[in-house]
């Protein structure tokens, strides 16, 4: 089974979220926050955006001329997860001979962008993470989180986890 | 927060680009049967209906949770397709206020592993009993909670409460679904004897009868129970739970039996409490019912009044102790689904909702 970009992202955010997501237990997203994200996603940079889908990988916006993968994010919180998600795309492109790309994270609300490169150390690290993700996904039960974390508040799984 | 839309005036629902238009056939008096008949005929020919002088009502699609069609309405497959795309279930009630069915759009939240677990919990009798017991436990608790509420308000219901709590003691030791159903039936029988004390002589229940309802109160109970059932079904639709695999009720071929299971827990709060309130406030009276073909039916106006109160009730918010935030009563149903999911995937043992206020 392929590791999706979202799964890699969740690996950094919360292992429980990763397990639930990988087992297709998703929470119906109804909050205004989610709607806001969806609308932003649909409307930002729409003039230059092109979505590409590979096996399990959905790239928001691919600049084929300059060989840049763009990732659009609402806030710069959970930065590590965003960063590795994008690096994973770069890794994926390299592994599957799609090409050597560089990355750029765009924060339209903050009017900010950030360049991302894939180093040899990154490749080693990503391969280690891929193994670990497989382990989490195949656990018989969802990993437990002892008590609500700060990020739980804005997570779509909050009600499911803590009710 | 998305809303439930209740259609009480005959009309046409149609898709107009990315919005729903509701076009009343004409300003028909709902009571006027003859007029209504003509309108119904008109609805067959949509062009004619459209040529009538009408006001259209625009319903933003992002805002629609589900539809309740309580009257004659017409629409086409384009509209149904639009509802599917936007994940909007449609519940239908007939002229007499009987539930006739649900347009349950294509499932969109599927989890193979959850489905496997749901089936496993059904096919293992011990696992199935464990969940069924919890449903009855929650229902029994909420039923006696209702009587306790009135017991502290100048009604004498102590005898019923004691008997019900006595009967509920047998729930943990029940060894078959039939036995559990029996306990539940007995608890309800005692519970219904409390109705006369709460509602006075005007609304005698005598016994709970369904098809057709043998007196006004039975008609009201049936209608309100179907409202709860459909609300629960809409919430199940928004989860990965399969609505046909149930634990207390036998998985039915013709109904979404998991919705029946979960509705047991919520009927005391959403249906019965409203009935008590509306009858005691004289918002619903015996004149609001009509008798036809040896059964009783709730008149259109009273049905509308009930639905209005029901909708208000679902929107009421309360502080959830565990989540430490305000949630709507309706949300409690979704949370119940989540708790069940967690039980099924072996995460956290399911504990039924018990009225905590």
Image: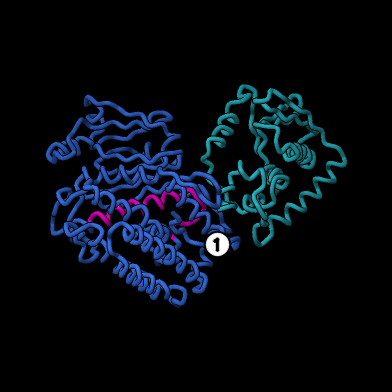
| Rendered colour, chain B | blue
Q: Which residue is mark 1?
A: B344
Q: Residue B289's x, y, as percent?
A: 17, 51
Q: Residue B21's x, y, as percent?
A: 34, 31
Give the extent of the magenta segment: B219-244
Depth check, front residue: B240 or A15: A15
**Neighbourhood count class around disc 1 (C-alpha, 10 Å): few under 14, some 14–19, many 20 upward:** many
Q: Residue B117's x, y, as percent?
A: 55, 63
Most extreme residue toward the right, as rendered?
Answer: A120
Residue A93 visible, this orientation: no
Magenta stretch prevailing secondary structure: helix
Q: Is residue A35 part of the magenta span, yes or no?
A: no
**Residue visible at 66% across and 25% down?**
A108
**In the image, residue B279 above or below residue B252:** above
Question: Could you tell whether B219 is left or right of B315 in the image?
Answer: left
Q: Residue A92's x, y, as percent?
A: 76, 41
Q: Quadrant of residue B28?
A: top left
**In the image, residue A47 above or below residue B144:** above
**Residue visible at 37% across and 46% down?**
B313
Depth check, front residue: A29 or B120: A29
Depth check, front residue: B289 or B93: B289
Q: Is residue B224 part of the magenta span, yes or no?
A: yes
- Secondary element at tag 1: helix
**In the image, residue A109 above or below residue B127:** above
Question: Could you tell whether A116 is left or right of B192 in the image?
Answer: right
Give the chain letter at badge 1. B
Residue A70 visible, this orientation: yes
| Rendered colour, chain A | cyan
């Amino acid at each position: 089974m392929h590791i999706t970009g979202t799964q890699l992202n969740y690996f950094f955010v919360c292992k429980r979220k990763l397990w639930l997501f990988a087992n297709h237990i998703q929470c119906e997203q109804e909050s205004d926050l989610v709607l806001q994200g969806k609308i932003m996603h649909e409307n930002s940079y729409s003039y230059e955006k092109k979505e590409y889908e590979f096996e399990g990988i959905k790239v928001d916006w691919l600049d084929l001329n300059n060989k840049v993968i763009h990732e659009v994010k609402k806030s710069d919180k959970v930065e590590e997860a965003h960063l590795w998600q994008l690096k994973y795309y770069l890794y994926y492109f390299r592994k599957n001979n799609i090409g050597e790309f560089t990355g750029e994270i765009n924060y339209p609300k903050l009017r900010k962008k950030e360049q991302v490169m894939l180093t040899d150390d990154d490749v080693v690290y990503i391969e280690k993470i891929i193994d670990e993700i497989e382990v989490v996904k195949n656990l018989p039960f969802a990993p437990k989180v002892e008590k609500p974390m700060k990020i739980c508040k804005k997570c779509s799984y909050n009600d499911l986890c803590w009710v | 927060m998305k809303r439930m839309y209740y259609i009480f005036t005959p009309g046409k629902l149609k898709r107009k680009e990315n919005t729903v238009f509701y076009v009343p056939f004409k300003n028909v008096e709902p009571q006027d049967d003859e007029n209504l008949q003509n309108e119904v005929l008109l609805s067959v020919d949509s062009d004619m209906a459209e040529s009538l002088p009408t006001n259209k009502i625009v319903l933003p699609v992002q805002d629609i949770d589900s539809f309740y069609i309580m009257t004659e309405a017409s629409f086409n497959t384009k509209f149904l397709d639009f509802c599917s795309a936007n994940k909007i279930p449609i519940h239908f009630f007939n002229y007499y206020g009987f539930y006739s069915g649900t347009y349950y759009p294509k499932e969109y939240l599927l989890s193979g592993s959850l489905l496997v677990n749901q089936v496993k919990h059904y096919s293992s009798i011990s696992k199935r009993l464990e969940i069924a017991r919890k449903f009855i436990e929650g229902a029994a608790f909420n039923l006696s909670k209702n009587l306790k509420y009135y017991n502290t308000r100048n009604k004498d219901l102590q005898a019923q409460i004691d008997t019900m709590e006595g009967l509920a003691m047998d729930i943990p030791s029940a060894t078959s679904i039939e036995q559990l159903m029996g306990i539940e039936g007995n608890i309800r029988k005692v519970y219904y004897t409390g109705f006369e004390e709460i509602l006075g002589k005007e609304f005698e229940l005598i016994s709970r009868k369904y098809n057709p309802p043998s007196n006004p109160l039975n008609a009201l109970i049936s209608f309100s129970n179907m409202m709860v059932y459909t609300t629960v079904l809409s919430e199940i639709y928004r989860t990965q739970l399969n609505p046909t695999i149930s634990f207390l009720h036998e998985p039915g071929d013709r109904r979404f039996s998991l919705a029946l299971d979960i509705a047991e827990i919520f009927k005391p709060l959403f249906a019965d409490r409203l009935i008590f309130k509306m009858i005691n406030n004289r918002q619903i009276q015996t004149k609001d019912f009509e008798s036809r073909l040896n059964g009783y039916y709730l008149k259109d106006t009273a049905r509308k009044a009930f639905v209005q109160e029901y909708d208000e009730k679902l929107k009421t918010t309360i502080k959830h102790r565990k989540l430490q935030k305000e949630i709507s009563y309706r949300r409690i149903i979704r949370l119940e689904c989540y708790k069940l999911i967690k039980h099924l995937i072996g995460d956290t043992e399911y504990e039924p909702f018990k009225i905590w206020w």
